[in-house]
Amino acid sequence: MPVRSSANTIPWQDLLFWLALAAGPVCWLALYLLLQPELQPAWPLASPLAYLLPVLLYPVLEEIVFRGLIQELVHDYLSARVFGPLSAANLITSVLFAGMHLFTQPPLWAALVFFPSLVFGFFKDRYQSLTTPILLHVFYNAGYLWLFAVPA
């Protein structure tokens, strides 16, 4: 399927969407096995705002800015540039997205944000909509922050 054409299915009928959803728990498990943090699964109940802002609000705002604005603007200039299943606009936007996370994350974590950003951008290109990237972003943030964020 060409990168900028609308998919004929909705995300729930798309195997790639389900694989992208499954990637979240797989990554969380890998991080858990690698880092072996002390889990505090009830912490969002004690600090709901500290959990809900980065889980619900930030993904929506980030997807509007990065996929809805930046990726679309870059597509206007590099519309025919594609590297496998990834558009040049997605690659450039993902570099910017990871770079912006340097303001709030250690360098390694900010760099690792590049990979989920590619997933979000891929689904923006695939469906020409922000719905799927926002859903994935919310899901990835929800699990990651629930398991690995240090409560304030």
Image (spheres, rainbow, N blue to C red):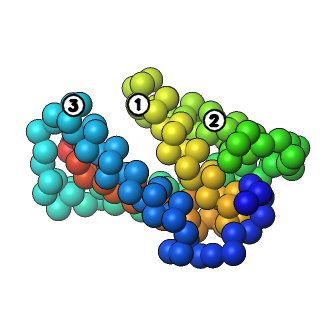
The residue type indicated by label 1 comes to Trp
Q: Is residue 100 left or right of residue 87?
A: left
Q: Label 1: which residue?
A: 109
Q: Secondary structure at mark 1?
A: helix
Amino acid residing under circle 3 = Leu
Tell me the tag on residue 35.
3
Q: What amino acid does circle 2 point to?
A: Leu
Residue name at image x 69 percent, y 69 percent: 7
- Please, is residue 31 above or below residue 75 in the view? above
In the displayed structure, 124 sits above or below 119; it is below
Q: Nearer the viewer, residue 112 or 44?
A: 112
Q: Secondary structure at mark 2?
A: helix
In the rendered view of the protein, which quadrant contains the N terminus? bottom right
Q: Tell which circle, 1 or 3, labels the residue nearer the N-terminal end.
A: 3
Badge 3 density bin: few <14, some 14–19, many ≥20, Cα 10 Å? few
The residue singled out by tag 2 in the image is 96
Secondary structure under badge 3?
helix
Which residue is depicted at the point 77% across and 57% down?
2
